Amino acid sequence: MDLGIAGRRALVCASSRGLGRACAVALAAEGVHVTLTARGAQALADTARHIRETYRVEVVEVVGDITTPQGRSEALQAAGPVDILVNNAGGPPPGDFRDWTRDDWMRAIDANMLTPIELMKATVDGMMGRGFGRIVNITSAAVKAPIDVLGLSNGARSGLTGFVAGLARKTVRSNVTINNLLPGPFATDRLTAVARGQAASTGVSADEILARRAAENPAGRFGDPAEFGAACAFLCGAAAGFITGQNIVLDGGAYPGTL
Ligand code: NAP
């Protein structure tokens, strides 16, 4: 299926690995030129090389922390006017809310709420002026069904979700859509890192924890990041202009609600 976005330009944040990388790859497969960001240079260079060698698109790499004003400014400058923005950053650490300080909260809110809002602020008017824009925010299934130990994530991402619900209705008339993708468990480095952390505190091996968790999912497995990338690319497609302000859960059916 041709999504009708070949030649468009995308800024895909936090995209050297995992879900962000999968979104960049899926967009590049549609002929979209991509600007990639991450803090670590090596994985970013590897991903950029892979995309360059596989698809006929321009790839720009920006090493930096997207949750800082400098990181955002450098990413935006390198990307130029973008048609597609994929907002992503690392998730906050788990814990007990009694232990979290105001600084912990501000870090989570900066990374998972204010950073995407700042990037939308910097790009949305240009998109509206050009009559095309697609913004996808990678949030979490925890927005729909909170995970108790991820209170920082539940809180900060819910703030972003509330903000997007309002803005998405203001931009769609100019063919600029804003949607959130809510990942459940996807097989990425983050999932493995969380399992390793649990292994250290429970005495059960990380492999065993992962196997049990995958088996508990209605799909009997974790999501493949490529499946996430494909959903992102679809929402960025020319034909997706009537989908806005939505929160789409990708979790193999783990969320048990009828609606
Ligand atoms: P991942 O495999 O750990 O990959 C994270 C990517 O983001 C890496 O490329 C990382 O590169 C980059 N990154 C992290 N913080 C950054 C920052 N401040 N500035 C720039 N780049 C940054 O994680 P993932 O599984 O793809 O998760 C992506 C997001 O989805 C996270 O917010 C996560 O909490 C959320 N999520 C994931 C799952 C899941 O099952 N995978 C489920 C629910 C929610 P560097 O480290 O080099 O910067």
Image (tube, rainbow, N blue to C red):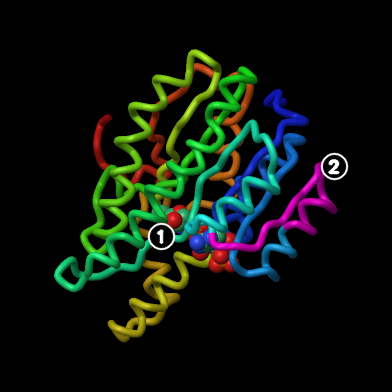
- Looking at mark 1, is its residue's CB closer than 8 Å to ligand 1? yes
Label 2 neighbour load within 10 Å: few <14, some 14-19, many 20+: some
Up the image or down, 169 lies above or below 204; here it is above
Up the image or down, 111 lies above or below 205; here it is above
Q: Hey, which quadrant is residue 147 in on the image? A: bottom left
Residue position marked by numbered label 1 in the rendering: 91
Quadrant of the image containing the N terminus? top right
Q: Residue at point 53% right, 38% down? A: 122
Is 64 colored magenta in this rendering? yes
Q: Nearer the viewer, residue 47 or 85?
A: 85
Q: Position of residue 42 (x, y in %)?
A: 70, 71
Residue position marked by numbered label 2 in the rendering: 56
Q: Residue at point 50% right, 50% down? A: 88
The reply to whether residue 119 is visible in this rendering is yes
Q: Position of residue 190 (x, y in %)?
A: 47, 65
Q: Nearer the viewer, residue 130 or 159?
A: 130
Up the image or down, 244 lies above or below 100; here it is above
